[in-house]
Amino acid sequence: MRVAINAWFWDRPDTGSGQYTRQLVEHLVALDPAPDLFLVPSSLQVCRYASLQAGDLAERQTGRLADLQKLHFEQVTFPRAAQKLGADVAHVPYWAPPVLPGVPTVVTIHDLIPLLLREYRGGPLVRAYTALVSTTAPYADLVLTDSEASRQDIITHLGLPAERVRAIPLAADSRYSPLPTPEDAAIRARYALPPRYALYLGGMDVRKNVETVLRAYRWVGPALGEWLPLVVAGQLPQRDSRFAPDPRRQARELALEEGWVHFIGAVEEADKPALYRGATVFLFPSRYEGFGLPPLEALACGTPVVGSDAASIPEVVGNAGVLLDPDDAEGMAGAILQLAQDDAFRAEMSRRALAQAARFSWQRTAQATLDAYRHAAIL
């Protein structure tokens, strides 16, 4: 089977779409039999994956012109390239299917955040783009998404027939493991981490709801704040705003003592497993996720999760965590205290964490995606 892949985000492994594209492609070609994959990048130097060389797909424009080029690439250039390649199916691994696909087309819609959450609708151009891709979604032969929660959102809000939307979960990278490495201690020392800590690692935008874990530490702090401080990891906002409230300001307003919370800023991708492995508990109070890779990465490291029961998070965490209403700071505090003080409970939750994480693998994701390609090709 010959598959053309929209590779616009290939050179952006710092984005979710870039990580998804790379992981999916690398595991698709490991299947037996494997599809014949062709990557179509913004530079239009179409590359057969089997002969891909470093730097082949690294050309990228920036700025307003890039927005127009991206739209033209998605709607005109990529579908034409797929036709020229004689592809059996084309895959757009993010929400941007063409109106005139030319060949059977599969699109992955990871979530409907720009459509469902007011704060993420952006300015006129972003809203116009969201309206366009919402309109073009029915032109895809199959829509893939990362969770059953997102599948239901797509069926409900985009009006697609249920049989044309498939939930195919993602997976954690294999480097997320409970087995410590010789570098772990040095990595944690580089971030000045304490011997024991509760960890939040992720974005600081309003959807991530970091304030709830800070409020939880109003209860945790007096009992365990010095012994089990909260480590907040992730790029801190350059300016305090409604979209990205500064957690440092929130901590001050909550009168949390300085020793109870450590803000360590951005974390290198390669360092994340060591931070998860060193944590007593991973905190994830997000209000909406299309999937939620951070809690799955934590589980794969054997770290229990305390977080919200919103959207797709229960599908990811299963019975390997304590999930509560996103605003239940007191309940989250109770779960943190129990995991910190009850060794038997934490050991059981850690065992469940590894069992839950084992249910997800990129090999299964790739196989289910290849099955979707085959189905789309014969529709």
Image: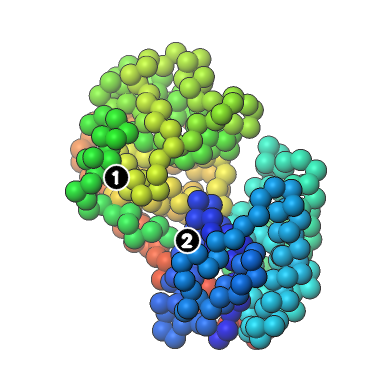
First of labels 1, 2 by sequence position:
2
Q: Amino acid at mark 2?
A: Leu
* 17 shown above or below 138: above
Residue 128 against residue 93 in the figure, above or below:
above
Q: Secondary structure at mark 1?
A: helix
One can see residue 16 in this view: no
Q: Is residue 290 left or right of 160 when viewed as pictured?
A: left
- At 64% from the left and 66% from the top, the residue drawn is 43
Instruction: Give the left or right position of residue 7, taking residue 331 as reference.
Output: right
User: The residue under label 1 is which amino acid type?
Assistant: Ala
- Give the residue number, with chain letter if any, for mark 1: 274
Position of residue 4 measured from the top left corner of the image (x, y, whole percent): 61, 76
Quick one: label 1, few (<14), some, or many (20+) residues within 10 Å? many
- Asked where in the image residue 47 lies, by quadrant, the reply is bottom right
Residue 147 is left or right of residue 98, and the answer is left
Image coords of residue 254 (percent x, y): 48, 16
User: In the image shown, does 143 or 83 lie closer to the viewer?
Assistant: 83
Of the pair 55 and 176, the residue shown nearer to us: 55
Q: Is residue 113 above or below residue 257?
A: below
Per the image, the residue denoted by label 2 is 170
